[in-house]
Image (cartoon, helix red, strand yellow):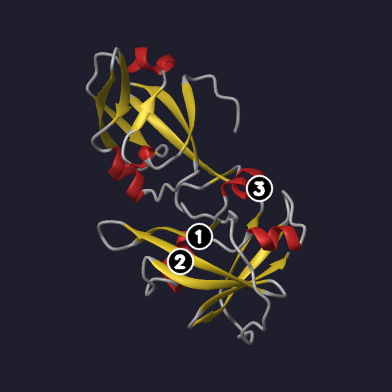
Amino acid sequence: MAANKKPSFNVEINHSMLRTLPIPNKVNKLVRGFPIFKVQRGEDTKVYSIYLLYISYGHRVETHFGKGWENFVEENDIQLEDMLEITCEGNRCFHVAVFRGGIEIPTAAINSNIIVLSDGSSSDGDGPDEVEGQPEFRATFTQPYINVGRLNVPLDFARSHLDSLGPETPVFAWMNKKYPSCLYVKRNSRDQIRLCNIRNGITDMIRGKKIKKGDKVVVQMISISPPAFKVSFA
């Protein structure tokens, strides 16, 4: 992230931050006394009205972005473990830059190209025949995502090719051997996929193939019934 002289703060998105976003103490003085703010991705992008929410924890009170924040998250496809850089632009307006795997996501395309790897088991066996022309996406291993343990599927890819699948579907990843896993899908109020990742079954792949931070791979969907993905070093 570039150095920013304007008041700003960084957060890594967890489950609770998909609903409300805590504001650090250093920014509280900038919002004190104003019940509503404008939040947008950047200049000439949609403006969201965000109301402040105060949450009491005994003698401690936290200030959060409340009503309106969840709508911003949903419409901009903010995902778990995204890093946000939130900058106060003055005039009660905040700009939000979104980073995924250390790469800033363009305003017009909030889609993940980062593999996030998970814990699980593997089994030997032949994989399905490769199908020529099957869709694929490219990804880079980063240490935080290796530690967290998931394979994030880009939203544009998921919406185009996995929209018919349910919330939890058995799948396998293929890298010279089969790694049974689970494809997890979460949808928004419009029944659009808002989060898609592969859980379970990948840690053995990391260990077996000695995958490390910075390794680049191509992930190809080689079957839809059952869903299967071939992972190859780029």
Tell me the quarter of the picture where residue 211 sits. bottom right
Indicate the position of residue 152 as horizontal and vertical percent values. Answer: 53, 57
Q: Residue at x 29, y 12 (%)?
A: 59
**Quadrant (top left, top right, bottom left, bottom right) of the C terminus:** bottom right
When the figure is inspected, residue 108 is found, relative to residue 56, above or below; the finding is: below
Badge number at residue 158 = 2
Badge number at residue 142 = 3
Quick check: marks 1 and 3 in contact, CB under 8 Å? no
Give the mark toward the camera: 1 or 3.
3
**Quadrant (top left, top right, bottom left, bottom right) of the N terminus:** top right
The residue that label 1 is drawn on is 154
Q: Residue at x 35, y 44 (%)?
A: 73
- The Cα atoms of the two marked residues, 1 and 3, are separated by 16 Å
Mark 3 nearby-residue class (10 Å; few <14, some 14–19, many ≥20): some
Q: Residue at x 26, y 60 (%)?
A: 190
Tell me the quarter of the picture where residue 4 sits. top right
Q: Secondary structure at mark 2?
A: helix
When the figure is inspected, residue 77 is found, relative to residue 63, above or below; the finding is: below
Q: Residue at x 67, y 81 (%)?
A: 125
Q: Is residue 37 left or right of residue 41?
A: left
